[in-house]
Image (cartoon, grey):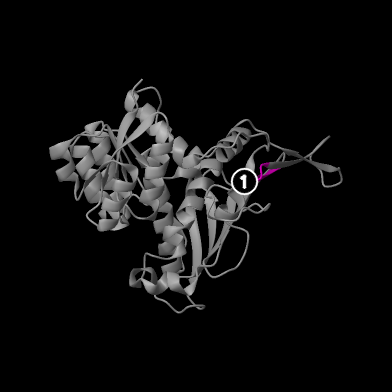
Amino acid sequence: MAPVRIAVLGAGLIGRRHAEAVAAEPEAALAAVVDPSEAGRAVAAERGVAWYPGFDAMLRAERPEAAIIATPNRMHVEHGLDVISAGIPAIVEKPLADDVPGATRLVEAAEAAGIPLMVGHHRRHNPLVRAAKEAIAAGRIGKVVAAQAICWFFKPPEYFDAEWRRLPGAGPVFLNLIHDVDLLRLLCGEVRSVQAMESNAERGHAVEDTAAILLRFAGGALGTVSVSDTVVSPWSWEFTSGENPVHTQTAESCCLIGGTSGSLSVPSLDLWHHANRPSWWEPIGCDRLPVTQGDPLRLQVRNLCRVVRGTEAPVAPAREGLETLKVIAAVKAAAATGRTVTLA
């Protein structure tokens, strides 16, 4: 079967990683790089594929079978509507849009047109996450009653040389925590209400550097989430999962899911339980769930190829990205008002 020809829109850091993933996946072939910058032209030359300054220019010359949109967040809706109008299945990097109305417009347009649209919540493709989901769904920890997630890392001063990174909308809640919230939704169910506090006390920028969040899930479970980009620590997905080779991998975990029969740490996949019956008077033991490692970005590309061929459903459909974005918007609203925000 011929590889699915995929165009990558955007040649920034994540766009280059997507191009690498497409090139590494046997079921895919990189068709083109679309980016008006010289950096985009250079990435295309490096990969030996066509370069186009814009989506329309590409369509005048060739038509890919799928696309990955990795342009700046503010352009996701525009570019997403372009690929939908062209009838091209696509992955849109997270977040789907700068706000919920924009993301809603994009999702509804894809659904109305019948064009498969996925969101770049690549952790859903990670075998570690899929193993955790399967264990929870199989009842191995009983009913989920609590969750705890930590997203701590340190962004150095030069990261903020770009002005937009110091402005509202560019903080760790919107740019980083969105992945952790999506993970909690996947493992614990839908979020029904949110309380939150934010602080910019460390750097004094207009955007937060630390936030503390409480989540109530539809099934009754409660979650606590802590995020900061001004803490030196090993407790973040990047440092614990080994997902991206540019980050050191530690032996820690950053997410705990607690149930009535056991508890699971993620991504280490240590499942803690009592051998005889649940009781703190009983000995507790640990089983590590078996898993086969895999590159989630490459697995995401493979899923896109199979969606195009009609042999698989999307692992991360765009509507899931919309629901996760709604939770992030609720976090920001709760922190701004000091009130509990209830989601429909």
Q: Residues within 10 Å of mark 1 (few under 14, many from 20)?
A: many
Q: Position of residue 286 (x, y in %)?
A: 77, 41
Instruction: Magenta stretch: give its range.
Output: 263-269
Q: Position of residue 147 (x, y in %)?
A: 61, 50
What kind of residue is marked 1?
Answer: Pro
Q: Position of residue 342 (x, y in %)?
A: 44, 54
Q: Is residue 326 above or below residue 287?
A: below
Q: Is residue 343 visible?
A: no
Would you name the residue on which mark 1 appears? 267
Q: Is residue 117 visible?
A: yes
Q: Residue at x 38, y 27 (%)?
A: 306
How many numbered discs sit on the rendered protein?
A: 1
Residue 265 part of the magenta segment: yes
Query: Label 1's element?
Result: loop
Residue 287 part of the magenta segment: no
Q: Position of residue 201 (x, y in %)?
A: 50, 78
Along the line of sight, which residue is nearer the eye, 275 or 45? 45
Residue 59, by quadrant, is: top left
Q: Is residue 251 above or below residue 227?
A: above
Along the line of sight, which residue is nearer the eye, 328 or 83? 83
Residue 136 vs residue 315: left or right? right
Q: Residue at x 57, y 46 (%)?
A: 220
Q: Residue furthest left?
A: 60
Q: Quadrant of the N terminus?
A: top left
Residue 272 vs residue 82: left or right? right
Residue 111, by quadrant, is: top left
Q: Is residue 235 above or below residue 51?
A: below
Q: Is residue 234 above or below residue 279?
A: below
Q: Residue at x 59, y 40 (%)?
A: 128
